[in-house]
Image (cartoon, grey):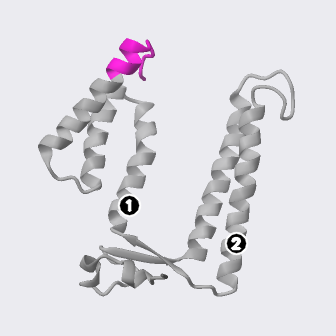
Amino acid sequence: MTTSASERRPASLEEDRPTLLSRRLLSLPLALLDLIVGIMFALVALSVWIGADYIERNETGLVGPAGFPRGVALIFGALALAMAVRGALGLRLNRRPMVEFAQPLAVLAAMVLAVAYPILLGYFDYYLVTGPWLVALFLVTGNRKPLPILLYAAGFLLFTKLVFEKLMGVPLP
């Protein structure tokens, strides 16, 4: 049985009449998202290709230690470009299936946290970054109970300390 997007939408979102951008619902054309994400992924593939230059290698081309990341970059880049082309064609042909994001601000905040985490790890200690980062992530994802948030974060930090540093002998950054 096929259902439309409006039939799958939670009742709480029906209270507001969604516009293109509202606090509760963001609706964008699928073709536009394909184009944007395809371009972003192509840039990631390009950065992986360029980053492979930093791997010490004696051979040229795809042979040697740099070969694996370059091979991944080629495959990832080709698929990303195909996705971008599909999006551009969809926009040109005026195809308008829409993709809806419930709570777009929370999705954006989670994306910012995901990008910020490895950057912060480059400057600060693992435990100093991960604890507050987990608390922020729990808040963004809708968990509002302070005691469970603190227990989850502390439990995760304890688990990683015991497993990686004590059991496996792998120091965390």
Mark drawn on residue 127? none
- Residue located 75% across and 26% down the image: 65
- Residue located 38% across and 78% down the image: 8
**Magenta span includes 72:** no
Amino acid bearing label 1: Val
Location of residue 32 in the rendering, given as x and y in whole percent from the top left corner = 58, 74
Label 2: element kind: helix
| 159, 37: nearer the viewer | 159
Judge from the rendering whether residue 55 lies leftward or rightward of residue 115; answer left or right: right
Residue extending farthest to the front is 1
* Residue 10, picture quadrant: bottom left
Location of residue 17 in the rendering, given as x and y in whole percent from the top left corner = 30, 87
- Residue located 76% across and 41% down the image: 71
Judge from the rendering whether residue 102 lies leftward or rightward of residue 50; answer left or right: left
Task: Confirm or deny contact between disc 2 and disc 1 (CB under 8 A).
Answer: no
Mark drawn on residue 107? 1
* Residue 169, picture quadrant: top left
Q: Which residues are magenta?
A: 161-173
Dot 2, crowdedness within 10 Å: few (<14), some or many (≥20)?
some
Amino acid bearing label 2: Arg
Mark drawn on residue 86? 2
Location of residue 130 in the rendering, given as x and y in whole percent from the top left corner = 33, 34
**Magenta span includes 163:** yes
Q: Is residue 37 above or below residue 21?
A: above
Question: Image quadrant for the C terminus?
Answer: top left
* Residue 125, picture quadrant: top left
